[in-house]
Amino acid sequence: MLKKQLDKIRPHFEEGGKFGAFRSTFDALETFLYVPNTTSKVGASIHDAIDSKRIMSFVIIALLPALLFGMYNIGYQNYMAAGVQASFFEMFFYGLIVMLPKLVVSYGVGLGIEFVVAQWKGEEVHEGYLVSGILIPMIVPVDCPLWMLALAVAFAVVFAKEVYGGTGMNIFNPALVARAFLFFAYPGKMTGDAVWLSKESFFGLGNSLPDAITMATPLAEASAGRINQYDFMDFVIGTIPGSIGETSFVAIAIGAVILLWTGIASWRIMASVFVGGALVGFLFNAVGPDTNVANLPWYTHLVLGGFAFGAVFMATDPVTSARTEKGKFIYGFLIGALAIAIRVLNPGYPEGMMLAILFMNMFAPLIDYCFVQSNINRRMARAKKA
């Protein structure tokens, strides 16, 4: 019935129709609901039965465990800071109320810009923001103001995507660009002990905490030598302060299984990020400086901060990562190694995953070029011998 209704009103949205100016909007809705019967003409390197919107949908499904746990953890941290007992559902619904406006603002601003640009260009609406729209709220502090989030989203969509030509053409990961914009433009709202705890009370849920209540992330505590208050299982389960989607290693691992099982993400990149991080962490344990962060066990580095989240959902971005199979190993390894090196060598910025991925985004094309050129040279040499 829905398909027949769409077919009936489609002529009004085609060129020359009453609503022809909104053709991009109608196309976005139709291709979101149904697989389109057209194929890419240019710019496509992979031909498959699945379209980009379905790929994005699988990534969103993979993000749901981390998102749902993040909502629970928002409430858990609030009630724990207040010293008040609460049920699982009270904690979860408190986190849901805190998180929902962030998701609405992220998608409202981001998709709004995408639709405006598509209408202006007369092109299809790019589907890449379906994932970025959920990623950005998950990697910002709990206490990030909505106006600041909207500004970061607008900056990322315009300057990290549209100026390059839209989805598939961008060099940098848009979600990380949004976080980098906030980090450098509003450092007071991205660092410190106060930004990782929601202090508001909603409809009788949660507790209105005074501004003096603070809660540092385990990485900040480790830098100060106070990490002993946490158990390793706290890091694995995720009942610790931090960005909304980055705390639970278990939830992130579930998402990783979904991405690998569906073939959306590259296991080469994902595995090599962890190998690079583990190796550099081990080296710092053995011969590194005698600092609190350098003395953290190598396996603790892998479950702290945004390392696991970045390895699973950011480094594996097919647009901004390396494309060659061997290049993916080098790309992922360097991300993991750089992330731990930044943590250890820069005490003022213990979370290095964002900068490591953005830095390697710049070098992904060079890595691919080196491997492609090497293959060409080897085949040319083989042809000469023949």
Image: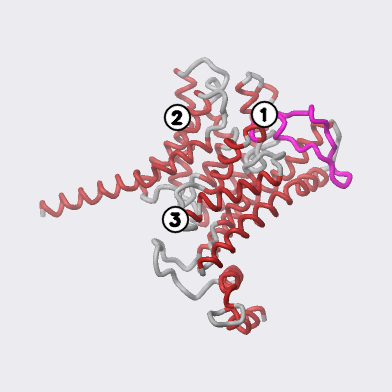
| Magenta stretch holds residue 165 | no
Query: Which secondary structure lies at badge 2?
Result: helix
Q: Amino acid at mark 2?
A: Leu
Circle 1 packing at 10 Å, graded few (<14), some (14-19), many (20+), is some
| Mark 1 lies on residue | 192
Helix, strand, or loop for circle 1? loop
Q: Position of residue 276 (x, y in %)?
A: 45, 34
Q: Is residue 182 above or below residue 255?
A: above
For residue 82, what is the image quadrant?
A: top right
Query: Residue sitting at 59 percent across and 73 percent down?
Result: 22
Q: Which residues are magenta?
A: 190-216
Q: Are marks 1 and 3 in contact (CB under 8 Å)?
A: no
The residue depicted at 45 percent of the width and 29 percent of the height is 279
Q: Which residue is mark 2?
A: 279
Q: Write down the residue under mark 3.
A: 169
Amino acid type of the residue tagged 3 in the rendering: Met
